[in-house]
Image (cartoon, rainbow, N blue to C red):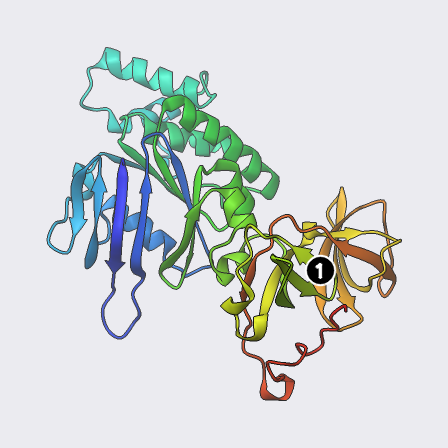
Amino acid sequence: MFLEVSQLGVHYGGSHPPAVDGVSFTMQAGEIGVLIGPSGCGKTTLLRAVAGLERAQAGNIRLAQQLVSSAAVHTPPESRRIGMVFQDYALFPHLDVAHNVGFGLTHLKPGPRAARIKDVLALVGLPEAGRRFAHELSGGQQQRVALARALAPAPRLLLLDEPFSNLDVDLRERLAHEVRGILKAAGATALFVTHDQLEAFAIGDRIGVMHHGKLHQWDDAYALYHRPATRFVADFIGHGVFAPARLLQQDGNVIVRTALGDLTDTLECPLPVAYEGGLCDVLLRADDIVHDDNAPVKAQIMRKAFRGSEFLYTLKLASGDMVMAHVPSHHDHALGEWIGIRAEVDHVVTFAREAVPLEHAVPTSATPAGLQLPA
Protein backbone atom coordinates (compact mmCIF):
# COMPACT_ATOMS: atom_id res chain seq x y z
CA MET A 1 0.00 0.00 0.00
CA PHE A 2 1.20 3.52 -0.81
CA LEU A 3 -0.64 5.41 1.95
CA GLU A 4 -1.54 3.61 5.18
CA VAL A 5 -3.45 5.35 7.95
CA SER A 6 -3.85 3.10 10.99
CA GLN A 7 -5.96 3.89 14.07
CA LEU A 8 -5.05 7.55 13.74
CA GLY A 9 -6.02 9.88 16.57
CA VAL A 10 -5.68 13.67 16.58
CA HIS A 11 -6.68 15.60 19.71
CA TYR A 12 -6.74 19.33 20.36
CA GLY A 13 -6.61 18.94 24.14
CA GLY A 14 -8.99 19.94 26.91
CA SER A 15 -12.34 18.23 27.22
CA HIS A 16 -13.03 18.30 23.49
CA PRO A 17 -13.63 14.93 21.81
CA PRO A 18 -10.94 13.80 19.35
CA ALA A 19 -11.00 15.60 16.01
CA VAL A 20 -9.88 12.32 14.41
CA ASP A 21 -10.70 9.16 16.31
CA GLY A 22 -9.27 5.75 15.42
CA VAL A 23 -9.32 6.27 11.63
CA SER A 24 -7.85 3.56 9.38
CA PHE A 25 -7.73 3.31 5.58
CA THR A 26 -5.26 2.53 2.79
CA MET A 27 -4.61 3.82 -0.72
CA GLN A 28 -2.63 2.28 -3.54
CA ALA A 29 -0.28 4.25 -5.77
CA GLY A 30 -2.21 6.09 -8.50
CA GLU A 31 -5.48 5.93 -6.58
CA ILE A 32 -7.72 8.94 -5.89
CA GLY A 33 -9.37 9.04 -2.47
CA VAL A 34 -12.02 11.48 -1.24
CA LEU A 35 -13.10 12.33 2.30
CA ILE A 36 -16.65 13.65 2.73
CA GLY A 37 -18.88 14.39 5.68
CA PRO A 38 -20.69 17.25 7.43
CA SER A 39 -18.87 20.33 8.67
CA GLY A 40 -16.75 19.60 11.71
CA CYS A 41 -16.56 15.85 11.06
CA GLY A 42 -12.72 15.82 11.05
CA LYS A 43 -12.01 15.40 7.35
CA THR A 44 -9.79 18.51 7.02
CA THR A 45 -7.96 17.66 10.25
CA LEU A 46 -7.27 14.19 8.84
CA LEU A 47 -5.94 15.72 5.61
CA ARG A 48 -3.70 18.09 7.61
CA ALA A 49 -2.39 15.17 9.65
CA VAL A 50 -1.41 13.34 6.46
CA ALA A 51 0.32 16.55 5.29
CA GLY A 52 2.21 16.81 8.57
CA LEU A 53 0.46 20.03 9.62
CA GLU A 54 -1.16 18.29 12.60
CA ARG A 55 0.55 15.88 14.98
CA ALA A 56 -0.79 12.40 15.67
CA GLN A 57 -1.48 11.51 19.30
CA ALA A 58 -2.38 7.90 18.48
CA GLY A 59 -1.96 5.46 15.61
CA ASN A 60 0.33 6.10 12.67
CA ILE A 61 0.62 7.20 9.05
CA ARG A 62 2.92 5.48 6.55
CA LEU A 63 3.77 6.96 3.17
CA ALA A 64 5.45 4.62 0.66
CA GLN A 65 6.08 2.26 3.63
CA GLN A 66 7.88 5.03 5.54
CA LEU A 67 6.54 5.93 8.99
CA VAL A 68 5.87 9.68 8.88
CA SER A 69 3.47 10.16 11.83
CA SER A 70 2.89 8.48 15.17
CA ALA A 71 2.79 9.50 18.82
CA ALA A 72 6.61 9.37 18.82
CA VAL A 73 7.49 10.23 15.20
CA HIS A 74 6.67 13.38 13.24
CA THR A 75 8.26 13.94 9.85
CA PRO A 76 7.92 17.67 9.01
CA PRO A 77 5.70 18.60 6.05
CA GLU A 78 8.60 19.75 3.87
CA SER A 79 10.22 16.31 4.16
CA ARG A 80 7.16 14.32 3.08
CA ARG A 81 7.20 15.30 -0.62
CA ILE A 82 3.50 16.12 -0.54
CA GLY A 83 1.79 18.69 -2.78
CA MET A 84 -1.21 20.69 -1.64
CA VAL A 85 -4.00 22.51 -3.48
CA PHE A 86 -6.01 24.92 -1.35
CA GLN A 87 -9.56 26.19 -1.43
CA ASP A 88 -8.47 29.75 -2.33
CA TYR A 89 -5.87 28.62 -4.94
CA ALA A 90 -3.15 30.71 -3.14
CA LEU A 91 -1.65 31.96 -6.40
CA PHE A 92 0.86 34.82 -6.23
CA PRO A 93 -0.83 37.81 -7.89
CA HIS A 94 2.49 39.51 -8.78
CA LEU A 95 3.79 36.47 -10.69
CA ASP A 96 2.60 35.22 -14.05
CA VAL A 97 1.31 31.67 -14.49
CA ALA A 98 4.69 30.23 -15.49
CA HIS A 99 6.43 31.65 -12.41
CA ASN A 100 3.57 30.47 -10.18
CA VAL A 101 3.89 26.94 -11.55
CA GLY A 102 7.69 27.01 -11.28
CA PHE A 103 7.70 28.28 -7.70
CA GLY A 104 8.64 24.89 -6.29
CA LEU A 105 11.22 24.10 -8.98
CA THR A 106 14.08 26.35 -7.89
CA HIS A 107 16.31 23.29 -7.53
CA LEU A 108 16.21 22.76 -11.32
CA LYS A 109 18.39 24.54 -13.85
CA PRO A 110 16.60 27.03 -16.16
CA GLY A 111 16.25 24.63 -19.11
CA PRO A 112 14.75 21.64 -17.26
CA ARG A 113 12.66 24.02 -15.17
CA ALA A 114 11.11 25.66 -18.24
CA ALA A 115 10.47 22.24 -19.78
CA ARG A 116 8.70 21.01 -16.64
CA ILE A 117 6.53 24.12 -16.49
CA LYS A 118 5.58 23.63 -20.13
CA ASP A 119 4.73 19.96 -19.54
CA VAL A 120 2.45 20.49 -16.55
CA LEU A 121 0.66 23.44 -18.15
CA ALA A 122 -0.04 21.23 -21.16
CA LEU A 123 -1.22 18.49 -18.81
CA VAL A 124 -3.82 20.78 -17.20
CA GLY A 125 -4.97 22.12 -20.57
CA LEU A 126 -3.36 25.60 -20.33
CA PRO A 127 -0.38 25.36 -22.72
CA GLU A 128 -0.57 29.03 -23.77
CA ALA A 129 -1.23 30.59 -20.36
CA GLY A 130 2.34 30.96 -19.10
CA ARG A 131 2.57 34.74 -19.50
CA ARG A 132 -0.88 35.52 -18.11
CA PHE A 133 -1.61 36.64 -14.54
CA ALA A 134 -4.10 35.14 -12.10
CA HIS A 135 -6.56 38.04 -12.38
CA GLU A 136 -6.77 37.41 -16.13
CA LEU A 137 -8.00 33.84 -15.62
CA SER A 138 -11.40 32.38 -14.78
CA GLY A 139 -11.91 30.53 -11.51
CA GLY A 140 -11.64 27.17 -13.25
CA GLN A 141 -8.40 28.22 -14.97
CA GLN A 142 -6.94 29.46 -11.68
CA GLN A 143 -7.72 26.09 -10.12
CA ARG A 144 -5.90 24.36 -12.99
CA VAL A 145 -2.86 26.59 -12.41
CA ALA A 146 -2.93 25.70 -8.69
CA LEU A 147 -3.07 22.03 -9.66
CA ALA A 148 -0.19 22.45 -12.13
CA ARG A 149 1.92 24.15 -9.44
CA ALA A 150 1.25 21.28 -7.01
CA LEU A 151 2.07 18.64 -9.65
CA ALA A 152 5.23 20.36 -10.95
CA PRO A 153 7.65 19.03 -8.28
CA ALA A 154 6.28 15.47 -8.85
CA PRO A 155 5.06 14.95 -5.27
CA ARG A 156 4.58 11.46 -3.88
CA LEU A 157 1.07 12.41 -2.76
CA LEU A 158 -1.25 15.28 -3.68
CA LEU A 159 -3.69 16.67 -1.09
CA LEU A 160 -6.62 18.88 -2.11
CA ASP A 161 -8.77 20.69 0.48
CA GLU A 162 -12.19 21.72 -0.91
CA PRO A 163 -10.50 22.67 -4.22
CA PHE A 164 -13.70 23.54 -6.11
CA SER A 165 -15.79 25.16 -3.36
CA ASN A 166 -15.36 28.68 -4.79
CA LEU A 167 -16.76 27.64 -8.16
CA ASP A 168 -20.38 27.43 -9.28
CA VAL A 169 -22.13 24.05 -9.11
CA ASP A 170 -22.03 23.18 -12.83
CA LEU A 171 -18.35 24.09 -13.13
CA ARG A 172 -17.48 22.11 -10.00
CA GLU A 173 -18.74 18.80 -11.36
CA ARG A 174 -17.26 19.37 -14.82
CA LEU A 175 -13.89 20.38 -13.38
CA ALA A 176 -13.95 17.38 -11.05
CA HIS A 177 -14.18 15.06 -14.09
CA GLU A 178 -11.40 17.00 -15.83
CA VAL A 179 -9.13 16.99 -12.77
CA ARG A 180 -9.64 13.25 -12.41
CA GLY A 181 -8.42 12.84 -16.00
CA ILE A 182 -5.41 15.07 -15.30
CA LEU A 183 -4.44 13.13 -12.17
CA LYS A 184 -4.82 9.79 -13.90
CA ALA A 185 -2.72 11.03 -16.84
CA ALA A 186 -0.04 12.18 -14.38
CA GLY A 187 -0.17 8.87 -12.47
CA ALA A 188 -0.67 10.88 -9.28
CA THR A 189 -1.91 9.58 -5.96
CA ALA A 190 -4.33 12.10 -4.47
CA LEU A 191 -6.54 12.59 -1.42
CA PHE A 192 -9.39 15.12 -1.60
CA VAL A 193 -11.60 16.73 1.00
CA THR A 194 -15.04 17.91 -0.12
CA HIS A 195 -18.58 18.34 1.18
CA ASP A 196 -20.12 17.75 -2.26
CA GLN A 197 -21.26 14.18 -2.96
CA LEU A 198 -21.51 14.58 -6.74
CA GLU A 199 -17.99 15.98 -6.77
CA ALA A 200 -16.77 13.04 -4.69
CA PHE A 201 -18.52 10.53 -6.96
CA ALA A 202 -17.05 12.20 -10.06
CA ILE A 203 -13.45 12.15 -8.92
CA GLY A 204 -12.88 9.40 -6.36
CA ASP A 205 -11.81 5.78 -6.72
CA ARG A 206 -12.44 5.40 -2.99
CA ILE A 207 -14.61 7.61 -0.82
CA GLY A 208 -14.54 7.86 2.95
CA VAL A 209 -17.56 9.09 4.91
CA MET A 210 -16.66 10.74 8.23
CA HIS A 211 -18.78 11.77 11.20
CA HIS A 212 -17.70 12.96 14.66
CA GLY A 213 -14.07 12.16 13.90
CA LYS A 214 -14.71 8.56 12.87
CA LEU A 215 -14.47 7.01 9.41
CA HIS A 216 -17.74 5.12 8.94
CA GLN A 217 -16.94 3.57 5.57
CA TRP A 218 -14.11 3.64 3.01
CA ASP A 219 -15.42 2.24 -0.26
CA ASP A 220 -16.32 2.98 -3.86
CA ALA A 221 -19.34 5.16 -4.66
CA TYR A 222 -21.54 2.21 -5.68
CA ALA A 223 -21.03 0.42 -2.38
CA LEU A 224 -21.61 3.58 -0.34
CA TYR A 225 -24.94 4.12 -2.08
CA HIS A 226 -26.22 0.55 -2.32
CA ARG A 227 -24.43 -1.15 0.61
CA PRO A 228 -23.92 1.49 3.32
CA ALA A 229 -22.11 0.08 6.33
CA THR A 230 -23.84 2.27 8.91
CA ARG A 231 -27.10 4.09 9.31
CA PHE A 232 -25.24 7.42 9.11
CA VAL A 233 -23.75 6.56 5.71
CA ALA A 234 -27.15 5.43 4.45
CA ASP A 235 -28.69 8.72 5.59
CA PHE A 236 -25.85 10.96 4.39
CA ILE A 237 -25.44 9.54 0.87
CA GLY A 238 -28.17 10.14 -1.70
CA HIS A 239 -31.91 10.56 -1.17
CA GLY A 240 -33.98 8.07 0.77
CA VAL A 241 -35.85 7.22 3.95
CA PHE A 242 -35.86 4.52 6.61
CA ALA A 243 -39.17 2.69 6.52
CA PRO A 244 -40.40 0.36 9.29
CA ALA A 245 -40.34 -3.31 8.32
CA ARG A 246 -40.41 -6.83 9.73
CA LEU A 247 -38.16 -9.70 8.68
CA LEU A 248 -39.85 -13.07 8.23
CA GLN A 249 -38.53 -16.43 7.16
CA GLN A 250 -40.68 -18.25 4.64
CA ASP A 251 -39.77 -21.44 2.72
CA GLY A 252 -36.09 -20.85 3.42
CA ASN A 253 -36.21 -17.26 2.14
CA VAL A 254 -36.06 -14.03 4.08
CA ILE A 255 -39.05 -11.75 3.48
CA VAL A 256 -38.90 -8.03 4.29
CA ARG A 257 -42.49 -7.02 4.93
CA THR A 258 -43.21 -3.31 4.40
CA ALA A 259 -46.20 -1.06 3.74
CA LEU A 260 -45.23 -1.19 0.05
CA GLY A 261 -45.33 -4.98 -0.05
CA ASP A 262 -42.83 -7.77 0.48
CA LEU A 263 -39.19 -7.35 -0.54
CA THR A 264 -36.98 -10.39 -1.00
CA ASP A 265 -33.22 -10.53 -1.07
CA THR A 266 -31.94 -13.80 0.34
CA LEU A 267 -28.29 -12.96 -0.39
CA GLU A 268 -28.00 -9.75 1.61
CA CYS A 269 -30.69 -9.71 4.28
CA PRO A 270 -29.86 -10.84 7.81
CA LEU A 271 -32.03 -13.49 9.40
CA PRO A 272 -35.07 -12.29 11.38
CA VAL A 273 -33.32 -13.21 14.63
CA ALA A 274 -30.86 -10.36 13.97
CA TYR A 275 -33.51 -7.95 15.28
CA GLU A 276 -35.82 -8.29 18.25
CA GLY A 277 -39.12 -9.59 16.95
CA GLY A 278 -37.73 -9.23 13.43
CA LEU A 279 -38.54 -5.51 13.60
CA CYS A 280 -36.15 -3.27 11.71
CA ASP A 281 -35.89 -0.26 9.39
CA VAL A 282 -35.29 -0.80 5.67
CA LEU A 283 -33.51 1.78 3.53
CA LEU A 284 -35.65 2.88 0.59
CA ARG A 285 -33.80 5.06 -1.92
CA ALA A 286 -35.70 7.46 -4.16
CA ASP A 287 -34.77 5.26 -7.13
CA ASP A 288 -36.22 2.20 -5.36
CA ILE A 289 -39.72 3.68 -5.66
CA VAL A 290 -41.37 3.53 -9.08
CA HIS A 291 -44.38 5.61 -10.13
CA ASP A 292 -47.02 3.19 -11.44
CA ASP A 293 -50.64 4.30 -11.82
CA ASN A 294 -51.76 0.66 -11.80
CA ALA A 295 -50.04 -0.17 -8.52
CA PRO A 296 -52.35 -1.04 -5.61
CA VAL A 297 -50.36 1.12 -3.17
CA LYS A 298 -51.17 4.84 -3.35
CA ALA A 299 -49.25 7.77 -1.91
CA GLN A 300 -49.92 11.48 -1.59
CA ILE A 301 -47.47 14.05 -2.94
CA MET A 302 -46.33 16.21 -0.02
CA ARG A 303 -43.34 17.95 -1.65
CA LYS A 304 -41.86 18.12 -5.13
CA ALA A 305 -38.52 19.39 -6.38
CA PHE A 306 -37.94 19.93 -10.10
CA ARG A 307 -34.56 18.56 -11.23
CA GLY A 308 -34.86 19.12 -14.99
CA SER A 309 -35.18 15.57 -16.28
CA GLU A 310 -37.06 14.44 -13.18
CA PHE A 311 -38.99 15.42 -10.09
CA LEU A 312 -37.97 14.36 -6.61
CA TYR A 313 -41.31 13.62 -4.95
CA THR A 314 -41.74 13.26 -1.19
CA LEU A 315 -44.73 10.97 -0.71
CA LYS A 316 -46.93 10.01 2.24
CA LEU A 317 -48.53 6.58 2.40
CA ALA A 318 -51.94 5.93 3.93
CA SER A 319 -50.08 4.44 6.91
CA GLY A 320 -48.40 7.80 7.52
CA ASP A 321 -44.97 6.56 6.45
CA MET A 322 -42.94 8.73 4.08
CA VAL A 323 -40.99 7.69 0.99
CA MET A 324 -39.20 9.55 -1.79
CA ALA A 325 -39.26 8.87 -5.53
CA HIS A 326 -37.49 10.04 -8.67
CA VAL A 327 -40.18 10.48 -11.33
CA PRO A 328 -39.62 11.59 -14.96
CA SER A 329 -40.44 15.29 -15.23
CA HIS A 330 -43.24 14.79 -17.77
CA HIS A 331 -45.20 13.23 -14.87
CA ASP A 332 -46.00 16.63 -13.37
CA HIS A 333 -48.45 15.88 -10.59
CA ALA A 334 -49.91 18.46 -8.21
CA LEU A 335 -49.18 18.70 -4.51
CA GLY A 336 -51.77 16.72 -2.58
CA GLU A 337 -52.45 14.37 -5.49
CA TRP A 338 -52.46 10.61 -4.87
CA ILE A 339 -50.38 8.48 -7.24
CA GLY A 340 -49.66 4.77 -7.52
CA ILE A 341 -46.21 3.54 -6.48
CA ARG A 342 -44.40 0.24 -6.12
CA ALA A 343 -41.03 -0.80 -4.76
CA GLU A 344 -38.28 -2.21 -6.99
CA VAL A 345 -35.42 -2.79 -4.55
CA ASP A 346 -32.33 -4.57 -5.86
CA HIS A 347 -30.31 -4.07 -2.66
CA VAL A 348 -32.24 -4.58 0.56
CA VAL A 349 -30.41 -2.84 3.40
CA THR A 350 -31.78 -3.05 6.94
CA PHE A 351 -30.84 -1.41 10.23
CA ALA A 352 -31.96 -1.74 13.83
CA ARG A 353 -35.11 0.22 14.59
CA GLU A 354 -34.42 3.65 16.04
CA ALA A 355 -35.88 4.33 19.47
CA VAL A 356 -39.34 5.91 19.30
CA PRO A 357 -41.03 8.13 21.91
CA LEU A 358 -42.95 6.21 24.57
CA GLU A 359 -46.34 7.30 23.25
CA HIS A 360 -45.45 5.72 19.86
CA ALA A 361 -43.91 2.56 21.27
CA VAL A 362 -45.50 -0.82 20.50
CA PRO A 363 -45.01 -4.31 21.93
CA THR A 364 -42.49 -6.38 19.98
CA SER A 365 -45.23 -8.82 19.03
CA ALA A 366 -47.32 -6.06 17.46
CA THR A 367 -47.15 -4.32 14.12
CA PRO A 368 -44.76 -1.30 14.11
CA ALA A 369 -46.52 1.99 14.81
CA GLY A 370 -48.21 3.45 11.74
CA LEU A 371 -47.30 0.49 9.52
CA GLN A 372 -50.11 -1.46 7.94
CA LEU A 373 -48.37 -4.64 6.90
CA PRO A 374 -49.83 -6.67 4.01
CA ALA A 375 -51.15 -10.08 4.88
Residue positioned 85% across, 48% down in the render: 331
Image quadrant in which you'd find residue 368: bottom right
The local secondary structure at tag 1 comes to strand
What residue sits right under mark 1 in the picture? 262
| Residue type at tag 1 | Asp
> How far from the left and from the top, in percent, is residue 72?
10, 54
Question: Is 77 drawn above or below residue 181 in the view shown?
Answer: below
In percent of the image, x 37 and y 23: which residue is there? 186
With respect to residue 108, does 306 lie above or below? Answer: below
The N terminus - image quarter: top left
- Residue 31 in picture, x, y percent from top left: 38, 33
Q: Residue at x 46, y 16 (%)?
A: 128
How far across and how far down the image is residue 267, in percent? 55, 50
| Image quarter of residue 34 | top left
Relative to residue 355, is residue 48 drawn left or right?
A: left
In the image, is residue 253 above or below residue 120?
below
Residue in the foreground of this view, choosing between 54 and 7: 7
Q: Position of residue 87 (x, y in %)?
A: 42, 44
Pick the front one: 59 or 347 = 347
The answer to whether residue 26 is left or right of residue 355 is left
Q: Would residue 136 be visible to someone looking at this image?
A: no
Q: Residue furthest left?
A: 72
Residue at (56, 72) in percent of width and height: 353
Image quarter for residue 369? bottom right
